[in-house]
Image: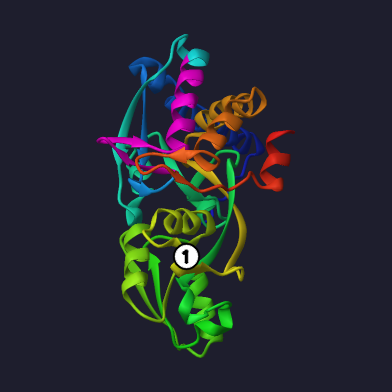
């Protein structure tokens, strides 16, 4: 709806009121955290090694990152670490807790895309990941063209769903793809369905293969459906001040060596509970970014 303004001063007043209102809303998240002395993170429980359950508690690379953020953020805004509360969310509705303000930050491996930026805010990136697929090595499915007529498994809510829709058009609508509840269930469906593939982030595929009983039975394609995209923490669209504060402490975590310690723990060391070694050196792009 168009609103006609007949006096320029009214325009100025309207803009100032809108700005002040927006600023107040943006600061509410910081004030709330300070007043309650805690921060609530939402997370996925089956995204090894980013976020998963161990001994009944959330653990993983992004879990460690968010714990460190809570300590430093609390120091900055309240003079002491914030108490951390965790909310487990399903993959298909992973961002709904932000919309409902049940959580302050989504703390799992979520891709920062232009489409998602219309509805949410994102931190600076802490990882880059491409989207590709895994299959039985004996099927020799090496590139996207070889997916013609195949059965595809993909997690509900994954950005790969849209990419698969476009690929399906190019392949004459020959794909039969099925949504799964999680990356683990998608991988299990692929394992039990001959000639099928599972599509998701490459780092998750390496992790799933490494944790399987016979890693040598599966091959990960080098043909990406989506090129490298940044992974970041997500916020509700009105958490402007919180995003700024989190970015500040993330830069500190990058610069003082804490991030390198976290990365090495999860990608270059044996990971519990089964002492899995992913052995994924930090990408040059990420290494260059955090050294700025």
Q: Position of residue 177 (x, y in %)?
A: 39, 77
Vertical placement of residue 171 versus 164, above or below: below
> Element at badge 1?
helix
Say which quadrant the C terminus sits in.
Answer: top right
- Percent across and percent down for residue 5 are 59, 45
Residue 115 vs residue 45: left or right?
A: right
x and y, in percent, of residue 2 in the image: 53, 55
Taking the spot 33% from the left edge, 18% from the top edge, the residue there is 36
Which residue is disc 1 drawn over? Answer: 216
Can residue 18 be seen at all in this image of the molecule?
no
Q: Furthest residue to the top? A: 79
Residue 116 vertical placement versus 149 (above, below): above
Count residues near mark 1 (Cα–Cα under 10 Å), then give few for <14, some for 14-19, many for 20+.
few
**Along the line of sight, which residue is nearer the eye, 16 or 148?**
148
**Residue that extends furthest to the left in the rendered view of this protein:** 56
Query: Where does the magenta region start and end?
Result: 50-74
Q: Is residue 42 magenta?
A: no
User: Residue 193, how many percent across, how many down?
Assistant: 33, 77
Q: Nearer the viewer, residue 24 or 39?
A: 39
Nearest the viewer among 42 and 150 is 150
Q: Inspect this view and state whether residue 11 appears.
A: yes
Q: Reply above or below: 15 against 185.
A: above
**Considering only vertical position in the picture, is 98 above or below 38?**
below
57 drawn magenta? yes
Task: Answer left or right for 29 relative to 273.
Answer: right
């Amino acid at each position: 709806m168009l609103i006609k303004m007949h006096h320029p001063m009214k325009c100025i007043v309207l803009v100032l009121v809108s700005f002040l209102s927006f600023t107040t809303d943006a600061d509410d998240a910081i004030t709330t955290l300070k007043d309650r002395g805690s921060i609530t993170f939402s997370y996925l429980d089956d995204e090894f090694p980013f976020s998963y359950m161990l001994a009944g508690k959330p653990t993983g690379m992004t879990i460690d990152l968010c714990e460190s953020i809570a300590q430093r953020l609390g120091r900055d805004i309240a003079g002491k670490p914030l108490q951390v509360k965790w909310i487990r969310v399903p993959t298909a509705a992973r961002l709904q807790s932000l919309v409902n303000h049940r959580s302050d930050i989504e703390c799992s491996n979520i891709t920062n895309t232009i489409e998602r930026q219309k509805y949410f805010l994102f931190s600076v990136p802490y990882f880059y990941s491409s989207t590709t697929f895994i299959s039985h090595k004996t099927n020799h499915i090496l590139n996207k063209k070889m997916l013609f007529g195949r059965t595809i498994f993909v997690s509900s809510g994954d950005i790969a769903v849209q990419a698969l829709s476009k690929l399906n058009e190019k392949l004459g609508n020959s794909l039969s793809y099925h949504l799964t509840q999680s990356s683990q269930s998608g991988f299990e469906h692929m394992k039990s369905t001959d000639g099928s593939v599972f599509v998701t982030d490459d780092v998750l595929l390496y992790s799933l293969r490494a944790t399987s009983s016979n890693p040598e039975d599966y091959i990960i394609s080098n043909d990406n459906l989506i090129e490298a995209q940044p992974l970041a923490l997500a916020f509700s669209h009105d958490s402007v001040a919180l995003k700024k504060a989190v970015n500040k402490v993330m830069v500190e975590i990058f610069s003082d060596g804490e991030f390198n310690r976290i990365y090495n723990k999860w990608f270059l060391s044996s990971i519990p509970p089964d002492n899995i070694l992913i052995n994924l050196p930090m990408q040059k792009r990420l290494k260059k970014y955090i050294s700025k």
